[in-house]
Image (cartoon, rainbow, N blue to C red):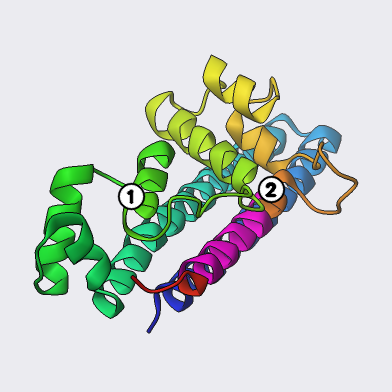
Amino acid sequence: MSALSRCEGRLNATELVWEWAQEARIEARLVGVLAAAEIDPQRKAQLEQERDVETSRADALAESALVRVVTAWEVFLRDLIEEYLTKRPQAFQNAWGLTGSADRMMAIVDKKHGAFQDPGNARKIFKTYVAKKLFEPELAGWAAVLAALECRHAIIHAGGTATIRFQEVVKTALPPRDWLHSKPQTAPLPGTEFERVLGEVRSAVTQLDERVWKTQAP
């Protein structure tokens, strides 16, 4: 199975997680309406507790979906380079004067270049082995990739708060989980920011895969 196919499978699974998040958010709102209208204090407290549980579940699922998008992107980058070097080992030999198995080549790539999590570093890896102008013009959806990376960073390393960097890149004052559920600001699109980002990341994945395999073999 190709790197592209594996990535598409991961993104499809992520879409399902997002649907669960949306369902939990709707349920939280419905229970909230019932709680607001309830007269009995004991029943009201019970409904408010249920609302809070559903809200927490919706937030956790939304954050999980975003993290999965970023993971799918980063794994795709490494898988694509491995697939490329396996099919076109001359690219690796041109860079290092060495040949070897896919595992050996990727061990050297990881050691010499570091992780694919850093977008600038990942681009350097592709420029080294595939083509120096691979990202000219810029990939469609690249801004969404950067937004997703910053959102993931805020979720994992800042407890889901809107860091200054997140606000600058995403251009919102909303915390990540609320931004994911909000309507797209950059275009009159239906759905949510998460759905916009997911669609644009898909575009970036497809376009990068096409560019890589259209380059002239070394």
Main SS, magenta region, reads helix
Q: Nearer the viewer, residue 95 or 80?
A: 95
Between the residue at mark 1 and the residue at mark 2, the CA separation in whole angstroms equals: 40 Å
In this rendering, the answer to whether 190 lies above or below 89 is above
Residue kind at label 1, given as amino acid type: Ile
Residue at the spot 67% in from the left edge and 34% down from the top edge? 178
**Neighbourhood count class around disc 1 (C-alpha, 10 Å): few under 14, some 14–19, many 20 upward:** many
Q: Nearer the viewer, residue 120 or 49?
A: 120
Give the quadrant of the N terminus. Answer: bottom left
In this rendering, the answer to whether 202 lies above or below 119 is below
Q: Which residue is mark 1?
A: 125
Which residue in the rendered view is the most extreme toward the top?
164
1 or 2: mark nearer the eye: 1
Residue at the spot 63% in from the left edge and 41% down from the top edge? 143
Residue kind at label 2, given as amino acid type: Arg
Q: Position of residue 31 (x, y in %)?
A: 74, 45
- Using the image, tell me which numbered label, if any, was put on residue 60: none
Task: Give the extent of the magenta segment.
Answer: 197-212
Element under disc 1? helix
Element under disc 2? helix
Q: Position of residue 151 (x, y in %)?
A: 53, 35
Q: Position of residue 128 (x, y in %)?
A: 32, 51
- Using the image, tell me which numbered label, if any, was put on residue 25: 2
